[in-house]
Image: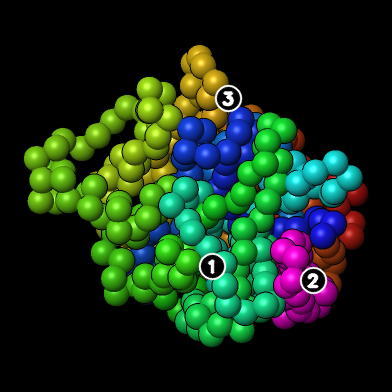
Amino acid sequence: MKRFHVVLAIALVAAAGLGASSAYSCSEVFLESGGRVKVSARNFDFGDGTGFVRYNPSGARRSAGYAPAGTTPLSWRSRYASLTFDKVLDAKSAGDDLVSAGVDGINEAGLKIGTYFLTASELPTTGARTVVDVALLMQYLLDGFASVGDAVADLEAGRYRVVPTPFLSGGQNAEVLLHFFLHDAAGDSAIVEFLAQKVVVTRKKDIPHPVLANHTYAESLDFLSQHEGYGGSRIIPGGWDFRPDTGQMVPERFVRGVYYLERLPSLSNSARAVDYGFATIQITSMAPFPTGPNSQQSTHWTIVTDIDNAEVHFRTLRNPTIATIDLRKLFFSRAARAGQLDLTRTDLAGDVTCRFYRRHCEE
């Protein structure tokens, strides 16, 4: 089936060749206090800084970007507007359109979704004949649901099946593999993974540490339990999280994220939480590898989303000055229009909401 542009949700293995030998190391910490503060801070680590932040108005018609032979792509009309951060991947084969990969997003109802590469993913191969490829799942959920509970219920209902998204990586066939961290305006959260061909949902009550990286949440908790203060004797780790000798990622960023998140001062307001979010997620950042096949892998985007105040703050490796998008102005302004900002720009700073208006800021 010929592919068109899709907006997915991934945190990503792309440029250097996909698989355990070249996994990228994205991560999130979630800051919450008394139901009044809900701030997601996440890194996106990959081989280059190209990509876009996009405004997607409600009412758009969409369908799954890829469907295997014998299946029917899921189709729908978006109910909610959303803001997404997207990365373009290579097409599956010559003549196909490029796959646009969204790494993070939030909709006008306050449903916020981040995605993180997960080698252990095993998506269903049997079940419903209507399918949505995992690359488009984030956008589908943002388009249609206001809460974590509703999104999870739809995933578990069985009326469609989630399938991998194939693409080319360094000229080789690859598949998108990922898991999701969901939050909403009411304070609910969930982690969604695809393991042993089943949808595995970890609800908020079973998330003692609201941190996610590139191992299953269960594996991450097990690794945490081996460290001082969490039941084990290992010291809190530093150093690289990628082992060039084995080509494997280790869940050390998860441990660092948990350790520093627990030691933050009191979160008295969202503005303070945004500051702390940028500081804490820095602990999990990846500097460029100095040499070797993974020398381009590093943290290129940092995104901090204040769900309560409906603001998204971001910076890039090329442009460390923080830019802000006011979601209330964007989602409910008649001046706003569908559009995107190139994240390789170095002039994005301060409030950039009006760059999505019919008359741009500079006009």
Q: Are marks 1 and 3 in contact (CB under 8 Å)?
A: no
Q: Residue furthest top?
A: 291
Q: Amino acid at mark 2?
A: Arg
The answer, for residue 283, to whether it is visible in the render is no
Q: Nearer the viewer, residue 171 or 206?
A: 171
Name the N-terminal-most of marks 1 and 2. Answer: 2
CA–CA distance between discs 1 and 2? 22 Å
Kindly state the secondary structure of the residue where label 2 is placed: strand
Mark closest to the chain's N terminus, 2 or 3: 2
Residue for point 31% across, 39% down: 252
Dot 1: what SS?
loop
Task: Name the residue rendered at 76%, 78% in the picture.
Answer: 76
Q: Give the residue pinned by disc 1.
A: 124
Please rate how many residues cluster around mark 3, counting C-alpha atoms within 10 Å: few if below 14, some from 14 to 19, many from 20.
some
Q: What are the residue bounds of the magenta stretch?
A: 56-84
Q: Disc 1 vs disc 2: which is toward the camera?
A: 1
The mark found on residue 296 in the picture is 3
- Tally the marks: 3
Instruction: State the image coordinates of residue 359 (x, y, percent, origin top left).
Output: 89, 57
Pointer 1 local density, CA inside 10 Å: few below 14, some 14–19, many at least 20: some
Q: What's the CA distance linking mark 2 and mark 3?
A: 34 Å
Residue 157 - label:
none
Q: Which circle marks residue 62 in the picture?
A: 2
Please indicate whether residue 326 sits to the left or right of residue 244 in the image. right
Disc 1 to disc 3, how far (Cα)?
33 Å
